[in-house]
Amino acid sequence: MKLKQTVNQVIKDAFEKAGIEAAPIPVSEATKPEFGDFQFNGAMALAKSLKKNPREIATTIVENLDLSGVISKAEIAGPGFINLWLNPEWVARSCENAEADTRLGIGTRENPIKVVVDYSGPNMAKQMHVGHLRSTIIGDTLANLLDFLGDEVIRQNHIGDWGTQFGMLIAYLEEMGEDGSGSLKDLEQFYKDAKARFDADAAFADKAREYVVKIQSGDAHCLTLWKKFIDISLGHCEEVYEKLDVKLTRDDVRAESFYNESLAKVLTDLDKAGMLTESDGAQCVFLEGDEIPVIVQKGDGGYLYATTDLAALYYRANVLGAKRISYVVDARQGGHFKQVFRVAKEAGFVPEDVRLEHIAFGTMMDKSGKPFKTRDGGTVKLIDLLDEAVVRAKEAITAKDAYSPEELERIARIVGIGAVKYADLAINRESNYIFDWDKMLSFEGNTSLYMQYAYARIQSIFRKYGKKLEGEIIIGDELEHRLAVMLLRFEDVLARAAEDAAPNQITSYLYDLVTLFMRFYERNPILKEGVDDKTKHSRLLLADLTAKTIKQGLDILGIQVVDKL
């Protein structure tokens, strides 16, 4: 349910009934319970255009409000604020409808669009490390969210598989004289060994350079070795994706090589648009107001990242038909994407109505505030980090309860991976964040374990109850009212998070919801002796809707729940 939209409609109806010819200003959520559920703060903004006192305008609106349906009470406060209380009966029926619906009453977009989400982007010459973690997690969450809301989401994994280093790598793979499965088990070491061979042996270096040309010219032998290297490298990525439980597949890969045949056309089209300028032998696009040009072809004829990105933008906007193209990439690439987006629009590669956005994110830091590294200063392999998360999760949950070996392994994986993902998603994505095992695996605070524990606690209530849910929801006190209204806000939260590409808005909502439910659970006993059946059934239904909301929210974040914890 779009709760805010429903309340805004009530205000709009009051405007029309009162004959106020002005666009209603949207309501906002009340900051305190004593101010109601929503506040309308638009009377002061309308005062000048309507030439009336703000409080007089507020009085006119309240006099024309329908207080028999969605809203049950309205009070004027201060110079012209209107505090609005939702009708408890309407809230109860709305929660019942959400509880009975597989989508919790959340609709899909009336006008869905195609959205391309470009994320993860590992380099095939190296094993995935922590630098790929944030792009992979944030991108997958955004894709999940937009898909749930009804957009047609096209996941794209733009891997680096085309460049001068690949001549060196496949020459070394050929020299090893094997299928590569052993040599490439550790990609980092394979790359170092190949680079050492390249630096030490001039004949090998010449061969590697020749192979670059052969790859680009379509030599069958070199392409076979190149494909073998890419295939094994992607296998390493897929192992990480499986552990992370993200939805990227081979079908989502759109590597640099995919756009190789389109690069010359990019230059031709830029030239036709009168945007191409030669500078020191290179082909460049000079943008008004920018001192540094966008280089699309080097003096030696080689292409750059900007060229490939322009080809990708053209493909995604005109072939795939995307109306929103989101690049989930490190914040340090902000300048690059700002220029590339501008060139794409000015050259007509992307229609004006297509939304281009760089979903920027900060750096993962250690407790000392430095970029996350191994003890010897190297990059942390992502697969090792995820394995450690599972080990640490075992320690955290065994301190709470006893499990069978199979159960411990399953729950530890869900808790450990969930902890890593949630810790990343719970902060403003543009901020750097401190990676802290103790904090992310805590049963308290804004952590996935806190959410998973709340869900498991609700399931234990139902196991103890052991009967089919029945009855209706009755809003008996202020705490029940606040919990019910919070549950109805879920769709608004998801819509705003999708618009802003901000997963932390979902985590903040879940934390507030679980915190409120825990207070409700402590003050409003459910199965305690002496609680009458109507009250018991009502509170069970609210608990069930809370659990479903937690589960759906975590599912969008790519995190599983457990029934026992």
Image (cartoon, helix red, strand yellow):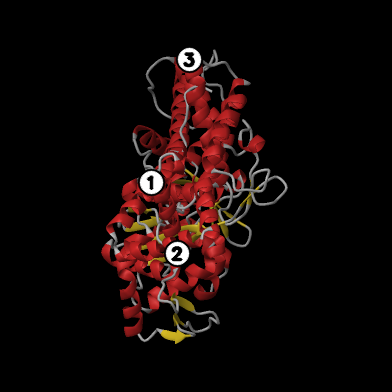
Which one is earlier in the sequence, the residue at label 2 or at label 3?
A: 2
Task: State the image coordinates of residue 184 (x, y, percent, origin top left).
Answer: 45, 44
Q: Give above or below for 12 relative to 454.
A: below
- Residue tagged by mark 1? 248
Q: Which mark is residue 206?
A: 2
The residue positioned 53% from the left and 16% from the top of the image is 403
Task: For marks 3 and 1, give the one nearer the viewer.
Answer: 1
Q: Amino acid at mark 1?
A: Leu
Seen in the image, is 220 located left or right of residue 32?
left
Report the mark closest to the observer, 2 or 3.
2
Give the mark, 3 or 1, whose residue is nearer the N terminus: 1
Instruction: Please give the residue where the numbered disc 3 appears in the rendered image.
Output: 464
Who is closer to the viewer here, 71 or 411? Answer: 411
- The residues tagged by marks 3 and 1 sit, at their Cα atoms, a distance apart of 39 Å
216 in relation to 300, above or below: above
Q: CA distance from mark 2 to mark 3?
A: 73 Å
Is 245 in front, or is 266? Answer: 266
**Hey, what amino acid is under mark 2?**
Asp
Give amino acid for label 3: Lys
